[in-house]
Amino acid sequence: MVRPLHHGIPSAHDEPHLSGRSGWLRAAVMGANDGILSTASLIVGVAAGSSDHVTVMLAGIAGMVAGALSMAAGEYVSVSSQADVELADIRRERAELHRNPEGELAELTAIYEVRGLQPALARQVAEELTVADALGTHLRDEIGLTDLSPPQPLQAAVVSALTFAAGASVPLMVGAFAPLDAAFSFWVGGATLAALGALGALGAQAGGAPRGRAALRVMVWGVVAMVATSAIGALVGAAL
């Protein structure tokens, strides 16, 4: 059974693939990771230079709102640009097929020869695929466009904003109840590292990758970010 490819191009992929999750999974993991880490780093940095708990929490809430909106806008623009590029390639390829079908057939034949087919067989395959679906074949084999992860700007924007806010809520909740003393950074930092590790493992599992390595990777960078912002906050607070 053939199901439609995005932009109206047919495809024969019926079985699910992990790479089909790449669009929303990337946006979700990036949003949650940024929400956890940027908000935790912000409140730890402010706490290092301030003795007012309310100020620290206001900074964290403002960072969460601004970050969620920024992530949504950035993802929407980025994925929209990707979609525009793909549409431009589709229009260009359709025009080339109309203007120079023989040249496009020769180009397709050469692609299959490079992939290991004998010239005669490569020509036969190119001709048969051209008859069946010339545009879809060129988009797939010449440009590399497939139906596994079509760009969805609105989905990416919404997922990024929601996951950023969800991630930011972890250090914010811990910071709201933790006393603003020497242990504040350890409370927030511990919760942040736990959340980052869990997020890295879940993202790796959803994408079929090793969980331990992904969790360790985000936790290491989390430590670096929080130590750096805490040091900067302390220096600025002392100077002021």
Image: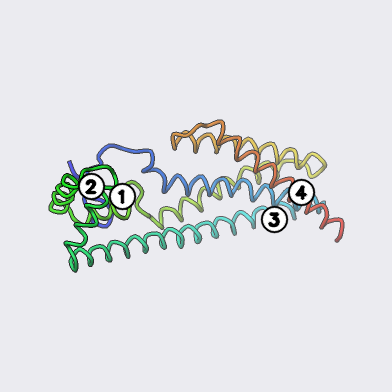
- Residue 200 location, x and y as percent? 55, 38
Quadrant of the image occupied by residue 82: bottom left
| In contact (CB < 8 Å): disc 2 and disc 1 | yes
> Residue 194 appears at what percent x and percent y?
63, 35
For the N terminus, give its image quadrant.
Answer: top left
Q: Nearer the viewer, mark 2 or mark 3?
A: 2
**Of pointers 2 and 3, the one earlier in the residue sequence:** 2
Judge depth for marks 4 and 2 and give the one in front: 2
- Residue that mark 1 sits on: 146
Location of mark 3 (residue): 58
Q: Which is in the foreground here, disc 1 or disc 3?
A: 1
Per the image, the residue denoted by label 4 is 230
Q: Give the alpha-carbon distance from disc 1 to disc 4, as whole Å.
A: 45 Å
Q: The residue under label 1 is which amino acid type?
A: Thr
- Alpha carbon distance from label 2 to label 3: 51 Å
Task: Decide: is 36 above or below 151.
Answer: above
Residue position for label 2: 11
